[in-house]
Amino acid sequence: MLDSAPSGSGHRGRSARTLALLSLAVLWTAACTAPADGAPDGDPTAAPPLPGPEDANGETGGDGDGDGGEAGGDTDPSGAGPLGGKVVVIDPGHNGGNADAPSEINTQVDAGNTEKACDTVGAETADGYSEHEFNWDLSLLVKERLEADGVTVVLTREDNEGVGPCVNERAAIGNDNEADAALSIHADGGPESGRGFHVITPGEVTGLTEEIVEPSALLGEDIRREYLEGGDMPYADYLAEEGLDERTDLGGLNLSTVPKVFLEAGNMRNPEDAALLTDTAWQENAADAIARGLASYLMRE
């Protein structure tokens, strides 16, 4: 299994990454008007590459509402950079202690239009690399990149050893921090024969999600575009449509009052996807792509 913390300094490549995002800002007029069809070839909205080193709920093709401890709250105190003043909540799905706390994570909580289990255990690869660990590893890498460009980043859990938090609490962390964007990072537990990633966006739930449906769709398109190009992972071929899936059954989305999406970064049960998901160099590149997608969205405002 991989270490929970990213290798190297948290400030690695700060100047180069900042320059890359400043270059992205120059391209922003095109990004605001170009069609979001997800095709990477010739896409004028694609950000310059950032330098860097190399369901448990029984729902088809998804790990359900496993949105996963305590609010992390680790932030870059300086706020210096092209994205200074922006707040992003990153939600590493599930948690390392969930499997040992069935009564706690199976407790039913409000999911907006229904009730759901507080949290779930998550998927794992055939070799036993757990989704909760992958989510934590990748979330730390994305956090590092965003903070290098001035973003205040809040994690929904402090480590990979705890239980939960429940899906409604995860949504509340984004709301309480008045996040400009929130991203829940997962890896799917789909059929072994299926591969690829997809982004889940909130559908309209009366009285709950009307205000976030449109901005969340834009957030999802920005992350999808950059992840497709930089993550070396195709669209999921077993669910969703061209990498996008709108859902109204996830508490983490239904209860959010800020733009939020889920990224299912790949299918842990597929051998090809698992080979990528478990590779530390791939994780670095995937984190670059996710950070570019978030930066693209933040620069829309």
Image (tube, grey):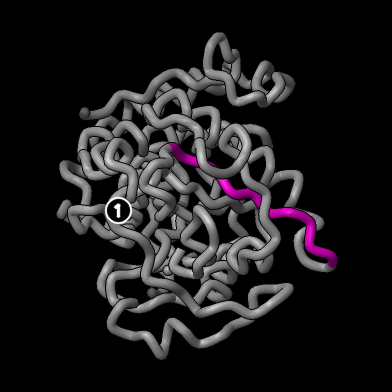
Q: Residue furthest front?
A: 193
Residue at horizontal 50 percent and vertical 87 percent from the top: 107
Q: Residue at x 18, y 53 (%)?
A: 127
* Residue at image location 53% in from the left, 12% down from the top: 41
Q: Is residue 195 magenta?
A: no
Residue closest to the far top: 42
Tally of marks: 1
Q: Give the image location of residue 114, x and y in percent.
A: 69, 77
Residue bearing mark 1? 134
The quarter of the picture where residue 121 lies is: bottom left
* Closer to us: 196 or 153: 196
Horizontally, is 290 left or right of 167 in the view? left
Where residue 109 appears, x then y in whole percent?
59, 83
Residue 222 figure quarter? top right
**67 in relation to 274, above or below:** below
Compared with residue 294, is residue 143 higher up or lower down, i.e. above or below? below
Near-viewer residue (87 or 4): 4
Does 202 lie within the magenta span? yes
Horizontal and vertical percent for residue 287? 36, 38
Residue 280 appears in the picture as rendered: yes
**Front in this rendered view, residue 38 or 142:** 38
The residue furthest right is 206
SS class, disc 1: helix
The part of the chain drawn in magenta is 196-206
**Label 1 neighbourhood size at 10 Å, few (<14), some (14-19), many (20+)?**
many
Against 21, residue 92 (above or below) is: below
Disc 1 marks which amino acid? Phe
User: Residue at position x 64%, y 74% from top?
Assistant: 111
Image quarter where the N terminus lies is: bottom left
